[in-house]
Image (tube, rainbow, N blue to C red):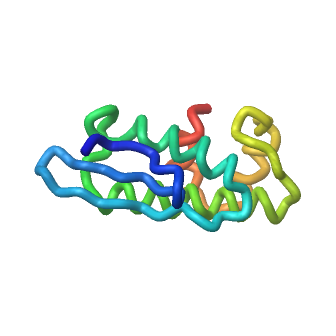
Amino acid sequence: MPTMVVDDPLSVRCVFSDGSSAEFDLAGLPNPRLARDLAVGLVELIHPHGSADSAGTVDAYAGALRAMVRALTQQGFAGDASELSRGRLAQFWMAGPSRLEALLIRVANV
């Protein structure tokens, strides 16, 4: 099973280099289009595509992704990732903990 986005229900499934596997639930987020776009970006960071190679690391990214989708939705954003402006992203990152910025800047590919 490769690392991939699963659409129903939305999740990311991973197989790591040590043979272990994990699935990270992203279903039920208030903006499913944005959640899916960010999930696609997350997959690119995970083994074998990228360097994230443990469930703990991917769990941190997935948690940050969930927080971002919820916060942006609360701020009135309803679009997909292509509609995120640098200004909106900067506003989001400046309002939150720096840990989120460090994790999400890689997922959002900015």
Which sits in the foreground, 86 or 48? 48
Residue occupying the far left of the picture: 18
Which sits in the foreground, 2 or 99? 2
Residue at (73% x, 33% y) in the render: 82
Residue at (67% x, 61% y) in the render: 96
Compared across the picture, whether 63 is left or right of 4 comes to right
Compared across the picture, whether 60 is left or right of 54 comes to right
Residue 110: % across, % down: 61, 32
Compared across the picture, whether 69 is left or right of 7 comes to right
Residue 22: % across, % down: 29, 60
Which sits in the foreground, 102 or 74? 74
Residue at (52% x, 50% y) in the render: 7
Residue occupying the far front of the picture: 8
Residue at (39% x, 39% y) in the render: 45
Residue occupying the far right of the picture: 76
Looking at the rendered structure, the number of numbered marks drawn on it comes to 0
Which sits in the foreground, 62 or 22? 22
Point out the image quarter for the N terminus.
Answer: top left
Compared across the picture, whether 87 is left or right of 33 comes to right
Residue 2: % across, % down: 28, 41
Res 108 → quadrant: top right
